[in-house]
Amino acid sequence: MNIPYSWLKELVPNLPPLAELEPTFAQLGLPLEGVEDVPAPPAGVLLVTVTRAEPIEGTQLTKLTLDTGANGKKVIASGAPNAVGLPAGTMVALVSPGTELGGMTYGVRALQGVESWGMAASAKELGVGESAAGLMLFPVGTAAPGTPMRELWPDDQVLDVEVTPNRADVLSALGLARDLAAFLKLELVEPPAGPAASGAGEIKVTLPPKGLRLERDPSKKLRFGCDHFAARTVGGLTNGPAPLWMQRRVSLAGMRPIDLIVDTSNYVMLELGQPTALYDRRDVAGDQIHVAFGLRQGEVVKDLLGGTHTVGPEDLLILGGNQPEISSVADAFATAGQPKAGDTVLGIAGIMGGDHGHVRADTTDVVIESAHFDPVLLRRTSTRLGLKTDAVYRYERGVDPLLAPKAANRVAALLADAGRGEIHPGATVVGEPEVPTPIDTTGDHIRALLGMHVDTAEMRDILTRLGCTVAGDGDALHVTPPSWRVDMVIWQDLAEEVARLHGYAELPETLPTLRVHPSNIGAEREGVERSTLRRTLAGIGAQEVVTYTFTSDDEAARARTETPGARLRNPMTADRTGLRTALYPSLLKAAQAHAKGDRVLIFEMGRIFPRSGEAERLGLLMRGPLAGATHQPGVAGSFAAFKGLVESLAATLGAAFEVRQLRGDAVPAALHPGIAGEVVWNAQPIGWLGAVHPEVAQDFGLKGDTYVLDVALPLPGRAWAFRDPSRAPAAWRDLAVVTPQGVSYGEVAALLRREGGDLLETVEPFDVYTGEQLGEGQRSVAVRLTFRAAKTLTDEEVDPIMDKLMAAVRAQGWSIREK
């Protein structure tokens, strides 16, 4: 937030120089992001009076006749659009001949037959603002003609204050001055309050009821749409340029001066922190204003800048016209005298005014709106419509719920003073605003939280200086926060304020005490498991990759996975339009980028977003040789090598690992139908691995075999137990089982383990044979069976088990290879 130092100095007269003040802002938790020195205009810039403005025929220039005071009457030619038809008496800033400005010295020169004596300047040309759209204009009688502008526009310093989201109360000159005065124990001089209202106002206002449920979605209940609304009227205004002092403060605060009515609204927002809206009274039909959710879904509203926005029942609007009182009616225009809905919209509440009702150059009578809106509701609407204004920036952070009438009075007073208008004595104030509730605590609670000693009496003094009402006897504190401190909700907020104003520098240096809550014991386990998994994967030679979470329909189709369901509203590129539904396409795309390389072994741990719900997965991809050839032959890449890597991973992590062959419809569409298996980790199925389908590999530009693992995280664990290794030797037997080639080894091993009993320790394959001796379509799988017990086993104990195993094999329809 930008604020001129001179403004703060007016509100806190005894404020120290800015050089001494910078550390104070940091101690208040409001550090300065920067300080800009804004010099006064050069001495040769004069305030002069326009006595006549006439167009120069055949050109886009305007001839201005000026009263320059001591230099007499002069003329200039100006190409500014707002120079056309300037009323006599309007004052402008004239860069007189001989003045150096912006590295250029101005003089007298002929323009279209006019001896132009200097130049009438814009704010940007003068270096006092950003507006370059036209001349700086000032009201009649601002100063005597020929007065140097620097006398009324002196140099200043603009503070760029960093405001945290919870401190909406300091988004104004008064709020910031209030905090400084409380910290430095200085007197605060508040701005003039404006004329208090007496009696009823001329405008009738209706508000939506609290707790209104949206008819389109009854599950959504709003706290309130608008719980406080003040309306006042000012008539007989002469709109035109705002006073110079007001333009100066608005410009230094980073806003562009427009005219008296608009600048006054902006000025009060910068001064008090309360946004206001002003409507041309001619457009407020029937002198009625309705705050309502009542527009039809898909209604189009045109704002005062010409933009159009589609709004619906969840958006709060300011409506004008002869309408019945609005309650929960979804369509407020059914009995609205048959006007079009868009024609009666005065504004999008708290965000921006509408095209209908906006202030114009000939506006003389205005209706002042000063209200308190639901911050959550406004934030949703502004985000949905893409409208971020200075008003909603304050509303969504929390505006003082009691400030509306005060701001309306202040706007009315400024308009009447500068625009020679007449304020109607009455005001319309409706609604029951919610105010901060009292907070009970004790000095001991606050001292224990802060870890430093602060007397309870000092706490009372600090909170009182901040505007709180403090009661309670002894150490007890019964604190009612001021209405502008909507961030004070719990007693810890009070402790924070005590620490701020007592001084963070007073906090003692102590070693932190580690207190582990029982619910946090073991909380680091998942993180440790993932770190261990990453290190283990790196240990087997894999490199981690981090890919985009976004994908496209085309990529999903090529990878034969689910089409993205969660889509981006505004994708940056055509290949990242939705959230991915599987992890392996990202690995295939990463491998594609390294397709010319000899070897790729990569993994990724990331989240996917299928329609079944968000999940975390681990993906591993291998292509090319497992180990390149050097002075010795390398290790070729194969399914066996890839499976061996995963087995090594499981063994290192102490997990039981098994691959079960998949067939038919159970094979994932991305895998080769003959090289696909289900991964069983610690007896739980968690995913699959296999060779990428040749067509999928071709679509991703991958030549040669590519192998992929895709499993769910976290990996299932199992209980650990210690068992003494057997001291007895093992007994080995070899068995060759002949089965049809469609029978997987897993089925053979499962049968043998099931029938082998407790003495069978391991089943390991060591040979696969196919040949004419077996017959067509048959194969022999030779396995080594390891038997072990607490004592040395004899043949008499092992042979019956072998007989049982062979009988089970034959009962399955298979045979035993004898030779």
Image: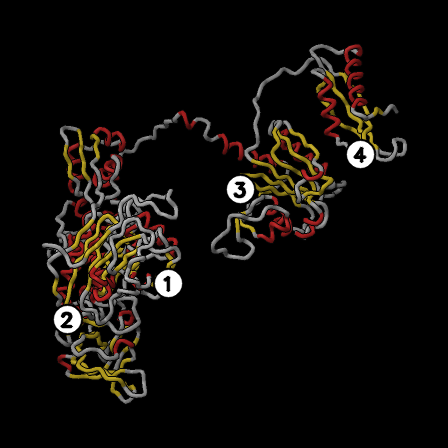
Crowd around label 4: few <14 · some 14–19 · many ≥20 (10 Å): some
Q: CA distance from mark 2 to mark 4?
A: 102 Å
> Helix, strand, or loop for circle 3?
strand
Q: Quadrant of the C terminus?
A: top right
Work out whether 666 lies above or below 245: above
Q: Which residue is label 2 attached to? A: 142
What is the spatial separation of the Cα atoms under label 4 and label 1, in whole angstroms? 70 Å
241 on left or right of 509: left
Work out whether mark 1 precedes mark 3 in sequence or the reverse, and give the earlier one: 1
The amino acid beneath tag 4 is: Gln
Q: In the visual, does 155 lie left or right of 762?
A: left
Residue in front for this viewpoint, 356 or 128: 356
Q: Nearer the viewer, mark 2 or mark 3?
A: 3
Mark positioned earlier in the residue sequence (4 or 3): 3
Question: Hey, what amino acid is under mark 2?
Answer: Thr
* Mark 3 crowd level (few <14, some 14–19, many ≥20, 10 Å Cα): some
Q: Position of residue 571 (x, y in %)?
A: 50, 55
- Asked if residue 205 lies left or right of residue 709, the reply is left
Numbered disc 2: secondary structure? loop
According to the image, label 1 marks what residue? 308
Q: Residue 309: horizontal and vertical position, in percent?
A: 37, 60
Dot 3 amino acid type: Arg
The foreground one among 279 and 744 is 279
Colour scheme of the rendered structure: secondary structure
Residue 353 appears in the picture as rendered:
no
Q: How many marks?
A: 4
Instruction: Please provide percent x and percent y for residue 625.
Output: 71, 43
- Which picture quadrant has residue 535? top right
Q: In this figure, which residue is indicated by the disc labeled 4?
A: 741
